[in-house]
Amino acid sequence: MKKIFTLMLLFVLCMTMGVYAKDINLDFLDDAVLNSSYTGNMTITIDKPLEVITVLEKGGYLNSVNKFIDLRALLEGLADSDIKLNCKINANKDLTKIRTAVEYDVFVPTVVNPNLKMHITARNGIWMDYDISGAEPKLDMIMRYPIFNKYLHVTEQDSMGKSMIESFMSIYGGEQNFLDTVKEFMIKYADITFSGNTYTVKLDNASVCHVLKDYFEYFSENMKKNTEQTMTEYSEYFDDNYDFDDYSPYDNMMSEVENFFEKTTIIGEEGITTKYVKGFGGKLKSEESIIPIDINLYKLLEAADAEIPVGLTEKNSSIAFTIKTTADYTNVGTTKKIDFPQLTEDNSFTFDDLNPFGYDDYDGYYDDYKRTNFDGWVNVQSDSVIKDGDVLYVPFREAIENACSYELYDEGDEDNPYYTISYVDGWVSFNSRLSDFGVLEFKVGRNDYYYKDGTYNFGAPKLINDRVWVDAKLFESVFGWKIEDITWDYITNILNVSFSSYNY
């Protein structure tokens, strides 16, 4: 259910900004989407009495809350909020290059209880300049939030920026550009009419469900294609037998969304209505969106198979409010100069600064990082169990490879590898610069092992299918590893032997 609520919130927020509606296949809207300046306003109005609060109070469900908060007054105060917006945007058609500035102020008259009333003014701002059209994506993003005393600066060099670049690539990196895709959805499901210079677009609850379904299917397909492309580009890191799992996290969300809308509604009967008015020269002059939210808490809990509070019914559990947004446009098609805040060391910080331990640049980290020890956990697998009396055997080379490399990208270098293994006439010689290990030598068929001028006796090594197998106890006595777990999977026919290093 958390996914569904998040999904709906994102959709409603997008609608208030006119993102979807402006992308309908109406020629005069194209410039407004990609190149314009506009000021906007958003208000919220409660449409029905909050009977659900009374029911919950009578049932004793708010006893703890009421000791501190007047919930009804708090919600009614939030409904009187006012949001003012200023936005400028200059983007290309496929949204792979965007420069935009969005500033919005939120005014909230808040009543926590009779003893605490306050008026909150929250300033917010997002300035973003990115380009993912070339081989080296670029990002320059500045954010201003009420919880911050300074600007948050994000670039493609830091951890948050890299994550955002990947998100942009997954959204706008498909074969069909994002705006054209959204246009198709809206034309397919919206009811569009016009009279003179006014165009009206309507979406009812069922239409919203269809748009959301197609919207996330688009993301799901893009994610799969991008994953397949990544695997192709880095195929050397995958086994030949690796089976690509054709899955996206959005797949499961499809059924959740459909099931949710089948059992309940969230959009009021009148549906979402957006009106566009053309001005001089056929350019977009203004828009107005009305988004009625009508949630029946009883049906919502029933759809989620959740416990329904005593006394709650379909008749007394409605939560209905209307979001209204307006926007006035200027410089449509001619917006060029978009100013960013001037940043200094004193008035800004980065996302990585939020972590007191710092976020490493992973590429640089592994370039400079010097391994000094074997991996702390070593897992060795084989497709058969080889025992000789009480001696259990494991593949020697596989154990060494796993112990000397955290990941495939951490294998040392050609001139100075973490380890060497040689095999000559049955003699195996192993050397590693990790932990100043030194040289270990043994011969297939003999139970004496030579290490640091000493001799150890274990089960005699075996050569089976071109693999050298050794006594598992070798790693305990010579390497200092402890056998933590030995399991045999009867379904996959795989033997797993897990070691841990005493040195970690």
Image (tube, grey):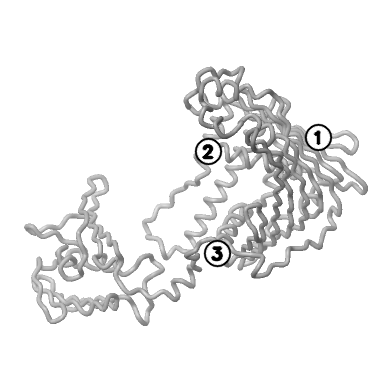
State which tag comes first along the sequence, 3 or 1: 1
What type is the residue that disc 1 sits on? Thr
Which corner quadrant of the image does residue 43 belong to? top right
Q: Residue at x 16, y 61 (%)?
A: 393
In space, the residues marked 3 and 1 are separated at their CA atoms by 47 Å
Residue 200 bears which disc, if any?
Answer: 1
Residue 353 bears which disc, if any?
Answer: 3
345 in relation to 13, above or below = below
Q: Which is more toward the observer, 295 or 172?
A: 295
- Judged from the image, the secondary structure of the residue bearing numbered disc 2 is helix
State which tag comes first along the sequence, 2 or 1: 2
Side of 199 relative to 107 (left or right) = right
Query: Comparing marks 2 and 3, which lies closer to the viewer?
Result: 3
* Image coords of residue 474 (percent x, y): 16, 67
In space, the residues marked 2 and 3 are separated at their CA atoms by 30 Å
Instruction: Let me know if residue 467 appears in the view.
Output: no
Residue of label 2: 2
Q: Which is more toward the observer, 241 or 410?
A: 410
Side of 288 relative to 457 (left or right) = right
Characterize the local packing of mark 2: few (<14), some (14-19) or many (20 or more) Cα atoms within 10 angstroms: few
State which tag comes first along the sequence, 2 or 3: 2
Characterize the local packing of mark 3: few (<14), some (14-19) or many (20 or more) Cα atoms within 10 angstroms: few
What type is the residue that disc 2 sits on? Lys
